[in-house]
Image: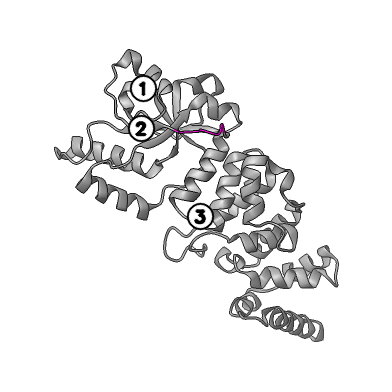
């Protein structure tokens, strides 16, 4: 791999003629975009990048593609400075970072720190490289592979990846909303790292039909491989549960939805919703304490006792 010092007029031609070229960002004369919905910036990862760049400089280039190429595949782009969605007639003025968001953000922050404090931590410019694509894969496929091989994905990353590659799919949009419900301060009653795929699948399909394999496949091949899902039903369950006092840090676990599914095997869905709607907060507090392999039976016992006592009164 070679690094070239190209003048401004020939920068893009040099890059396109030799895809292994590493070039400074300023030479490309383009704005920078992120793919909307790509991996969220992690404070931990960002801190590590900042510390590394302070000590060692930029060791790897940021991987980019042309904004028009990404937009032509239906990806939604946002300006990395303003976070505003970029209009289709403006995408040609951008390059898109498909690997290296933390690296780019860390350097940008250090550049601002240098200006404010008179320090000299940041590189004078950001080194970028157009993605090598020897087999002519789609931009969506490149994003999937670069992210999966640079940082091991957990289940929730597959939801994020699938949603960014299929930005108009209602199932993936809803799944990403649940993945993104992460605790940001003590006491907010949100899950530490969002809803896991296993729970999202149960809310949407009443089973384990939505998994990593299907999410990975739909990133490159489209949404036809996704399972059938009842999104209004999932939203109704969560809406009703939250209304009576259940919090997302509890609902993100399997216990509540496993009980709902089991009840729906013997009762109609609307009847089960009425059961939940009628719960008082003391009963909710009692249910929240129930965990373990026998949770479904234990929740049923609490709910049955509550309604029996209510009828007796």
Mark 2, residue position: 128
- Earlier sequence position, callout 1 versus callout 3: 1
Q: Quadrant of residue 280?
A: bottom right
- Principal SS element in the magenta part? loop
Q: Residue at x 38, y 30 (%)?
A: 20
Q: Residue at x 69, y 68 (%)?
A: 257
Q: CA distance from mark 1 to mark 3?
A: 31 Å
- What is the secondary structure assignment of the residue under circle 1? helix
In the image, 86 versus 124, the foreground residue is 124
Using the image as rendered, state which of residue 102 and residue 238 is in the foreground.
102
Magenta part of the chain: 131-136
Q: Are marks 1 and 2 in contact (CB under 8 Å)?
A: yes
Q: Which quadrant, please, contains the N terminus?
A: top left
- Residue 214 vs residue 174, the one in the foreground: 214
Dot 3, crowdedness within 10 Å: few (<14), some or many (≥20)? some
Q: Position of residue 123 (x, y in %)?
A: 23, 36
> What residue is pinned by disc 3?
153
Q: Which mark is residue 28?
A: 1
* Nearest the eye: 172 or 1: 1
Give the answer, above or below, for where 91 lies relative to 50. Answer: above
Going from the N terminus, do you reach mark 2 or mark 3 first?
Answer: 2
Decide: few, some or many residues near mark 2? Use Cα within 10 Å; few <14, some 14-19, many ≥20.
many
Residue 133 is a magenta residue:
yes
Query: Are dots 1 and 3 in contact, CB under 8 Å?
Result: no
């Amino acid at each position: 791999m070679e690094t070239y010092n190209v003048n401004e007029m020939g920068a893009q031609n040099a890059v396109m003629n030799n895809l292994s070229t590493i070039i400074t960002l300023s030479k490309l004369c383009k704005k920078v975009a992120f793919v909307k919905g790509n991996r969220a910036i992690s404070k931990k990862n960002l801190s590590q990048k900042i510390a590394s760049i302070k000590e060692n400089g930029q060791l790897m280039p940021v991987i980019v593609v042309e904004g028009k190429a990404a937009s032509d595949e239906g990806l939604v782009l946002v300006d990395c400075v303003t976070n505003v969605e970029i209009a289709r007639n403006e995408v040609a003025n951008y390059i898109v970072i498909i690997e290296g968001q933390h690296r780019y953000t860390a350097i940008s922050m250090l550049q601002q720190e240098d200006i404010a404090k008179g320090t000299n931590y940041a590189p004078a410019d950001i080194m970028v490289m157009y993605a090598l694509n020897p087999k002519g894969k789609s931009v969506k496929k490149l994003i999937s592979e670069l992210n999966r091989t640079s940082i091991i994905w957990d289940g929730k990353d597959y939801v994020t990846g699938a949603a960014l590659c299929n930005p108009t799919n209602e199932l993936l949009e809803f799944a990403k909303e649940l993945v993104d419900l992460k605790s940001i301060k003590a006491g907010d009653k949100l899950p530490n790292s969002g809803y896991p795929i296993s729970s999202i699948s149960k809310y949407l399909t009443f089973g384990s039909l939505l998994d990593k394999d299907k999410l990975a496949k739909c990133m490159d091949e489209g949404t036809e491989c996704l399972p059938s899902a009842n999104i209004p039903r999932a939203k109704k369950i969560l809406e009703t549960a939250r209304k009576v006092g259940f919090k997302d840090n509890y609902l993100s676990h399997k216990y509540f939805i496993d009980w709902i599914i089991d009840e729906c095997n013997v009762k109609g869905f609307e009847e089960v919703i009425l059961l939940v709607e009628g719960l008082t907060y003391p009963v909710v507090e009692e249910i929240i304490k129930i965990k373990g392999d026998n949770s479904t039976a234990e929740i049923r016992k609490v709910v049955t006792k509550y309604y029996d006592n209510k009828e007796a009164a």
